[in-house]
Image (cartoon, rainbow, N blue to C red):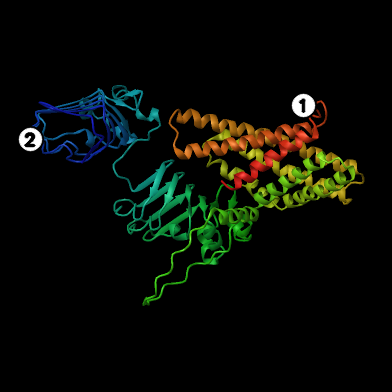
Amino acid sequence: MLIVFPGCLYIGRGLQIRECRIGRVDEGALGGLFTVGSVHLQSNQIVRLSPGWSNGMDNIGKLVFTYNTVREPMASTDCLRHEGAQRFEFADNTLHCSCALQWMINAPEEEQWLAENYCGPEENFKALLYFSPAAAGCAPWMPPPLLLQIRECRIGRVDEGALGGLFTVGSVHLQSNQIVRLSPGWSNGMDNIGKLVFTYNTVREPMASTDCLRHEGAQRFEFADNTLHCSCALQWMINAPEEEQWLAENYCGPEENFKALLYFSPAAAGCAPWMPPPPPLLVPSPAPPLPPRPSSSPSSEVPDSFSTVLERFDGRDKTIRSLYFTLVLIANRLRDQRKADQLMAFARQFSRTRLVCRMFSQPSLLLSVLRIPRAFRLSRDGVDFTLASSISVLYLFCGWTELIGLLTESGFVGRTTAHSLRYFGRALRLWVLALALSIIRCLRQIVRRTAANGLTWRKSDREWLKTQLISLVGFSADFVAAVNSLPRGMLWAGKMLPSHCASLHLAASVVGVFKQFM
């Protein structure tokens, strides 16, 4: 089957397919053309060229395949061979060849096919005939090995039984891959595999159960050091002892460890208690049809979403922070000084509540900092990883400094109020530095993604950009207001009105609450 977009076929004495976008050319796609003297495929964008695509062209006098671009990497020269046509021209094409193909072209019998074509956007096959593919990072290729390794790949999904039927492979290693979806039963059919290794992979789509992690067939299964985006149902499941062996050595999201979740309630992450569905009856009994479930109205979704936000630590923290700065702004506008002082005293209770609640986030932050050396080998962007790790370390030290300041203010450490103010001042400096690094990291991610995408932005990319811009606004507002609280002489410290600082902090708090609904 030849999949093309209409409007690019020209039929005269010969069949001409020019400047088309072709999804794939399957085996025998051009077979059975009895009334066409020649076939020309020129200047096309082809995703996949299957082996045997030119089979069945026994009545064709000439087959021309020139100036085409084949995007999918080809592992062998089988896609370039033909049967039937009396004359075959294959030249000036741009082919994305695999390492295996780059090693194959050193054989003399392949030179006639590949010398006049291009491997990738820059390298010419003719050049590769005289230089070792090892210069391009390709290890020497051998025919089907006893070990199948799939490393550092971007995989859309792994369907059920995707790796079944591997009879000549002793072991399969999937390592350091970016996987969108891992379907239940993906490892079924691997009865002849001795060892299946699934390590250092990232699975982006949330998994609702542990069925995706089970295997059938392989004699030995290693599943460790993976980053999994798990649903609330999965977070509750892992409290069961029989699941610990699968999940104890993997990560749930970028920060939380499954092992930590075994000892702390998932409710802290905003997950309502979940129970598995009851088993179905062996003999189903007829039951009257259920009435249609009423659709939820927007008026009922808002309270549910807000209650879910308040169940999370970040949601509660940003909400309390928004209330605090709202009360501060109201107190600054009151003309009655007595009522203003009372309202400020009431607002300080919200600030003290946030300070105490932040202390309980330090254990999870400490765990993430301790895992930095271990996670360093999994990172592909060293600069981004360094920025993220530095931010985590700064927030950890900031929390400890605030704790010492709180103990000093209560009289447990130190003797004067000046000591507590000194510690809170140091915490403020650490927070300002963390905000500056957050802004730099956010800007760098936006610039890199914009440069990579150019003018073609998918819907997911636009959503990501919107989230990043909202985060950048929040970080910037907090940074401008926080610098004003530093000692005088540092940047613009002390030059802004208190109401202006409170307005900026309130804007950053509202941004934080808004992000919880996204």
User: Disc 2 marks which amino acid?
Assistant: Phe
User: Disc 1 marks which amino acid?
Assistant: Trp
**CA–CA distance between discs 2 and 1?**
82 Å
What residue does disc 1 label? 492
First in sequence: mark 2 vs mark 1:
2
What residue does disc 2 label? 34
Which quarter shows the N terminus?
top left
Regarding mark 1 in the picture, which secondary structure is present there?
loop
Left or right: residue 93 versus residue 219 is left
Residue 480: percent from left, percent from top: 72, 31
Q: Is residue 433 visible?
A: no
Residue 453: percent from left, percent from top: 45, 31
Regarding mark 2 in the picture, which secondary structure is present there?
loop
Residue 365: percent from left, percent from top: 66, 48
Q: Is residue 367 visible?
A: yes
Q: Nearer the viewer, residue 400 or 466?
A: 466
Which residue is most to the right?
Answer: 415
Q: Are marks 2 and 1 in contact (CB under 8 Å)?
A: no
Q: Nearer the viewer, residue 395 or 370?
A: 395
Label 2: few (<14), some or many (≥20) within 10 Å?
few
Q: Is residue 405 above or below residue 86?
A: below
